[in-house]
Amino acid sequence: MNIKALVMAGAAMAVLASPAVAREIKVKGSSTVLPYAEIVAENFQKSTQYKVTVEGGGSSAGLKDFCLGLGEDKIDIANASRQIKKAEVETCAKNGVSDIIEVQFGYDGIVFASDVKGPAIALEPKDVFLAIAETVAYNGVPVPNEAKTLKDVNAAFPAWPIKFFIPGEKHGTREVFEEKVVIPGCKASGTLEAYVKAGKDEKAAEAACKKFNKDFAVDIDGDYTETLARLDSNKKSIGVFGLAFYESNTDKLRVATVSGVTPTGATVASGEYPVSRPLFFYIKKAHLPVIPGLKEYAEFFVSEDMIGPGGPLETKGLVPAPDAEREAVRATVSDETTLK
C-alpha cells in the first residue's frame, strides 16, 4: 500500500475507531443479487436489532462505491453478478480497501424472453450476434450488418423488427451476456476469424464483436422491471433477464431456449444451460469489527436456511451451490478469509 493509501486508510479507521459505529449496514450493487439481498435483509432484521439498507444500481456501480474507501459514510458490502476485476481490486487498495472477503453464494441463469403470448423462440448464440452486431462476416470479410428482422437472421424466427433490450454496461449481467453469448456467436458466425484475417489481434477482434447496432440492441441501465416495461410496450421484442426475475414473471414472459436447452434451476445447476454465472457479494474486512451486525448479516446470508435447497432464496430463483461449496463459503465468512 502506498503512502497516500496508508494515510487514507488511517483517517478512515479513525472514523471507524471503537466504540462501534451505530448505523445501518450498507449494501449496494447488482440488480440480479438485489432481490436475494432484500430477502436476507428482511429476515435478518426480523430476528435481530440491526438495520440493513440494500440498493441496486448494477455490479460495476456497487463495486465502484465499495472501492471509494473505508469509513462511516462508505458502503460495507457490494453485491455483484460477476467476479471483481483485478483493476477494481487495485483501485480498492489505492483507497485503503486492502482486505476484501469474496463470498460466492449461488448461481443464476441469464435468459431471453419475449411476451408470454408470442411464439416459441429457439436461440443460438450465433442468432443473437447476427441480429444485433454492427458488423458481420460475409464471404470471410467483415461487412456492415444488413439484417432488419429476426427472419433475416433465421428463417425459423418471426418477421419481427430486430429489437433486443440488453443490460447496460454498468451491469454485471452485460459482461456475462457478452462472454457467454456474444463472443461465442461471433466465433460461430465466422466474424471473429474475419476480423483476425483483416489484421486485428484477438483482443481487438473480440472488442469489435461487442459493437452493436444501437437501434437493435437497446441498453437498459435500470433493473429488470424496466426491461419488462419495454417488452410490454413492444410485444415483438426480446429482453435479457435473470432466471429468478423470469420465474417471478412467467405470467408475462415466454422464455426462449438457448442451444436447445430450457433455462431452469436444474439445467443451470448442472451446467447444461450455457448462459449461467455465479453470484457474489464482497465485504470490507476492516468494517467487520466496527459496524454492528455486519458479520452477523454475512453469516446469516450464507446460512443453510437462506442459500440451501428449499430456502427462500431458491424459492426466489437462486440455484443453490453444491453442498461442498456452501460449506466452504460459510468457512470463508466465519474465518474472514480475504482475497489473495
Image: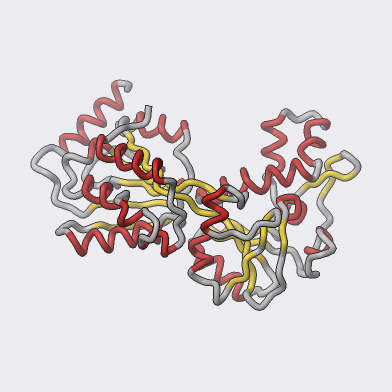
Vertical side of 74 occupied by 228: above or below: below
Question: Image point 21% across, 58% down: which residue?
Answer: 51
Q: Which residue ends up furthest to the right in the rendered image? A: 139
Question: Image point 36% across, 60% down: which residue?
Answer: 311
Is residue 44 left or right of 205 when viewed as pictured? left
Foreground: 122 or 234?
A: 122
Foreground: 267 or 51?
A: 267
Vertical side of 331 occupied by 109: above or below: below
Is residue 19 left or right of 13 when viewed as pictured? left
Horizontal and vertical percent position of residue 195: 79, 35
- The quarter of the rendered structure image containing the N terminus is top left
Horizontal and vertical percent position of residue 73: 24, 47
Question: Image point 61% across, 50% down: which residue?
Answer: 272
Horizontal and vertical percent position of residue 262: 63, 60
Residue 66 can be seen in this image: no
Question: Image point 62% across, 70% down: which residue?
Answer: 254
Q: Which residue ends up furthest to the front in the rendered image? A: 323
Residue 179 can be seen in this image: yes
User: Tag count in the figure?
Assistant: 0
Horizontal and vertical percent position of residue 328: 35, 38
Is residue 191 left or right of 72 when viewed as pictured? right
Is residue 244 left or right of 291 when viewed as pictured? right
Q: Which quadrant of the figure has residue 189?
A: top right
